[in-house]
Structure formats: structure tokens, C-alpha cells
Image (cartoon, rainbow, N blue to C red):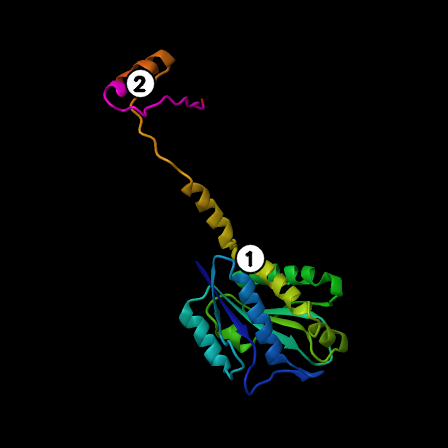
Amino acid sequence: MKLLVIDPGHGGKDPGAVSNNLKEKNLNLLLAQLVADKLSAYDLKIILTREADTTLGLAERVKIANRSGADFFLSLHVNAGAGEGFESFIHTSCSAQSQASAYQSCLHRQIMAGLAKHKIRDRGKKRANFYVLRKTKMPALLLENLFLDHPREAKLWQTKGFPPLLANSIVCGLVEALEISEEGKNASRDHKIQDVFYTVQIGAFRHRQNAEKKLQKAKRRGFHDAFIQAVERSP
Ligand SMILES: [Zn+2]
């Protein structure tokens, strides 16, 4: 089973961006929890670098990911600085053929598609020398989910339906990137296999009359519940 580390940026003493009565650290955690929640239906192990409003250094986040042997590291942030829109980052050293780049493409495309009705500006798939991208040993991606200091985007974040919509889009990207399936699908397959009964066979005959003879013999020997079952054989 694959292992995903989700890293809600900032936390505790470090609020991250602060604007329009919003603190980035809270939005990152909310989003991480929504994503983890939705992913619980899938064949995937998930570790959150923080599950509460706690202070956590960048080195500690990387340590959690590297120690766990995760398959993918996803860091969640919200931007600020007088811009607008969504952007995603992999490390500057990643080639276009890298796993990180492939994951970035899946998530970026699914997120932009999921947010299409809100006409979010696509700032592009980018590379940066961020610490958590540089030091993690597995493919790593950092998302900047809109701008807290942009009035429309801050308002969007405060709309009830928006965080779940964004979380859904991230999950769609992860499902595609990590090629994971819902646990429920496997479970229903297993369920069908359980609906099995076992027959004891004492002969198989091409002609019905030979089967009748064997049946009579079986009944004489005391197997009174023996019966003939016609089975079609595929060519
Ligand atoms: Zn941040």
C-alpha cells in the first residue's frame, strides 16, 4: 500500500500569511484534514505532519517524511503578496521526466479543472528551491492555494463549499497520480467470491443415461440426496 505524507504548512507560533481575518496555518490544516478524510476511502496510508495547531519546523516535517519512507510528500499552503490564483511547485532539480513532475501535472490539472467554475487564474507549474522540496527523499509537491490578501479569493476560502471542493480536486489528482482505488471496490469483489458452495462429484458423463445409472448406484449405497446437475462446458 502506498504512503502519502500531507504537510499542512506553518502552525502554532507561525501563522503563515495573515489577511482578511484569515490565518494561513488554519486553512492549510483544514484542507489537509479534508483531503485525508476523503482519502480514507482509498487503499492508501496517510500521515499528516501536524494534526493540530502546533509549531513544527521545516526540518521536522522533512524528517517525518523521510523516516516514514513515504511515496509522495504533499505540502499545502495559501499564498499572499498582492497576486491571485493557484500555482504548484516541485524542486528546481526535478527534470521534466521526474516522478515529481508527473505528479505535479496530475494534481495541477485536476485542481484547475475542479476550480474551473470559480475562474481561478492559473499561475502555472513552477519549480523552486523550497526547503521541504529540496530535503525530502521522495517526489514532493507544494501547492499555493490562492491568495489570502486577494479580496475575492479570501472570500472564496470563507465560502462553506470551497474548501471541500478544493479538497476533492486534490484527491482526484492524487488518485490519478498514485493510481489508487477505492477500498470499497475491492470489498464488493471479495463479497461476490464469498457466495460460493461446494459440490461433491462422483462422475461426469456425456450421456444422460450413464449419469442416471451412476445416480441409482449412489442412492443404493445410501447417498439419498445425490442428484444430477447439467453443466454446460465452454468450448
Ligand atoms: Zn505558506
* Residue extent of the magenta highlight: 218-234
The residue under the point 54% across, 63% down is 100
Prevailing SS of the magenta stretch: loop
Q: Residue 175 shows which numbered tag?
A: 1
Residue 174, given in percent of the width and then of the height, sits at 56, 60
Drawn side of residue 210 relative to residue 48, left or right: left
Q: Residue 215 shows which numbered tag?
A: 2
Drawn side of residue 202 relative to residue 175, left or right: left
Residue 232, given in percent of the width and then of the height, sits at 44, 22
Residue 173, given in percent of the width and then of the height, sits at 59, 60
132 or 152, nearer to the observer: 152
Do the CB atoms of the residues marked 1 and 2 lie less than 8 Å apart?
A: no
Q: Is residue 215 above or below residue 172?
A: above
Q: Is residue 127 above or below residue 11?
A: above
Packing grade of label 1 (10 A; few <14, some 14-19, many >=20) is some
The residue under the point 51% across, 76% down is 51
Quarter that holds the C terminus: top left
**Mark 1, mark 2: which one is toward the viewer?**
2
Badge 2 marks a residue whose secondary structure is helix
